Image (tube, rainbow, N blue to C red):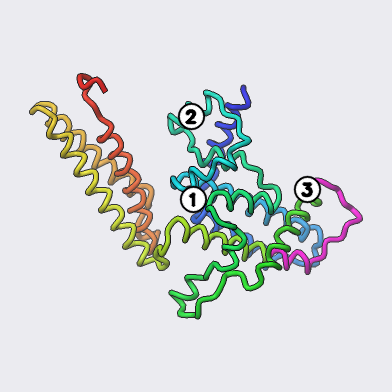
């Protein structure tokens, strides 16, 4: 098996191991579990304490690979800005074919290959993609939830950014020592691990706020607002699909029109069933059910738009 094929398979396997497809969806659940474990662990167990920096950096690297993917796959200017992070990548026909066939995205490919083993790697990659100094932008990133929902005065997520950056860099160092050295004579103090833990969590939350505002400025924050916005987005996609369908219908004769209408009706049944399957039982999902259902339905509608718009009769020569 070629190295190229390995990369394609690795990306596919990474995708399958995620519950959600975006950094902003994955991060809260992972951080919640990690914080819960850290709060409950016995700090007198020094060997266990040593491994929290490993878990933290795993979370940091995993989050930033997803964030890089999300930025690039959102299109320009981030796609064009990815030229520098992608400059060291070697492409061959197998990779180009996989991207063309939508087996993987450009964002997944770049995110999979970019080095993120040090804090300066992360800083350089995100700075290149967003087109502004990443750390400087983090210094002024505001906690929208605290301000807009809780009514607090606007304040930066990072109260002491220099300390946070230093602690995150130190966590990378600790991870390297723990993972690559036996270091039996090296003492890692619980107080330092706790400080690094708090700083890494703050760093991730500030970054998530920044990237969320970069990709979706002014996005809804409460569940009700998100449900409404998802419903509106679905309605807009359905309207575009309706226009595409009418464009096809005008080109069909009577027998073709009947077959097309039948296919569209069956597609609608499939789309509704798929969205219901993804969202699950409404009684078990609470207030987030409309958001999940609408997002799943929109994904199916957007795919159908591509199919309908891309359709050509064999005789059209397209």
The C terminus lies in quadrant? top left
- Distance between mark 3 and mark 1 Cα atoms: 28 Å
Dot 1 surroundings within 10 Å: few (below 14), some, or many (20 or more)? some
Q: Is residue 186 magenta?
A: yes
Image-quadrant location for residue 148? bottom left
Q: Which residues are magenta?
A: 180-197
Q: Earlier in the sequence, mark 3 or mark 2?
A: 2
Residue to which mark 3 is pinned: 179
| Relative side of 52 to 235, left or right | right
Task: Name the residue at 16% across, 35% down.
Answer: 261
Residue 22, numbered circle? 1
Dot 3 surroundings within 10 Å: few (below 14), some, or many (20 or more)? few
Q: Earlier in the sequence, mark 3 or mark 1?
A: 1
| Relative side of 112 to 306, left or right | right
- Distance between mark 2 and mark 1 Cα atoms: 20 Å
Q: How many marks?
A: 3
| x and y, in percent, of residue 139 in the image | 60, 67
Image-quadrant location for residue 55? bottom right
Vertical arrangement, residue 270 with respect to residue 289, above or below: above
| x and y, in percent, of residue 313 in the image | 21, 24
The answer to whether the residue labelled 2 contacts the one labelled 1, judged by CB atoms less than 8 Å apart, is: no
| x and y, in percent, of residue 45 in the image | 80, 63
Task: Name the residue at 52% across, 45% down.
Answer: 81
């Amino acid at each position: 098996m070629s190295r190229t094929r390995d990369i394609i398979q690795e990306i596919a396997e990474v995708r399958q191991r995620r519950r959600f497809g975006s950094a902003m969806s994955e991060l809260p659940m992972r951080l919640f579990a990690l914080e819960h474990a850290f709060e409950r662990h016995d700090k007198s167990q020094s060997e266990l304490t040593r491994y929290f920096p490993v878990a933290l950096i795993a979370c940091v690297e995993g989050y930033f690979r997803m964030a890089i993917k999300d930025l690039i796959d959102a299109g320009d200017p981030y796609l064009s800005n990815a030229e520098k992070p992608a400059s060291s990548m070697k492409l061959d026909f197998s990779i180009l074919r996989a991207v063309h066939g939508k087996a993987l995205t450009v964002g997944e490919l770049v995110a999979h290959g970019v080095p993120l083993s040090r804090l300066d790697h992360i800083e350089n990659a995100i700075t290149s993609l967003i087109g502004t100094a990443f750390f400087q932008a983090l210094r002024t990133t505001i906690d929208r939830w605290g301000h807009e929902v809780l009514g607090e005065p606007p304040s930066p997520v990072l109260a002491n950014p220099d300390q946070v950056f230093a602690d995150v860099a130190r966590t990378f160092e600790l991870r390297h020592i723990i993972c690559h050295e036996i270091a039996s004579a090296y003492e890692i103090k619980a107080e330092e691990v706790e400080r690094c833990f708090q700083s890494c969590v703050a760093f991730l939350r500030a970054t998530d706020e920044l990237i969320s505002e970069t990709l979706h400025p002014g996005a809804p924050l409460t569940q009700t607002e998100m449900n409404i916005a998802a419903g509106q987005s679905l309605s807009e996609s359905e309207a575009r699909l309706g226009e595409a369908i009418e464009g096809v219908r005008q080109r069909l004769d009577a027998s073709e029109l009947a077959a097309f209408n039948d296919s569209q009706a069956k597609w609608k049944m499939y789309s509704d069933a798929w969205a219901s399957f993804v969202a699950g039982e409404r009684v078990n999902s609470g207030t987030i059910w409309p958001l999940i259902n609408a997002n799943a339905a929109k994904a199916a509608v957007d795919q159908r738009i591509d199919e309908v718009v891309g359709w050509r009769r064999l005789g059209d020569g397209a």
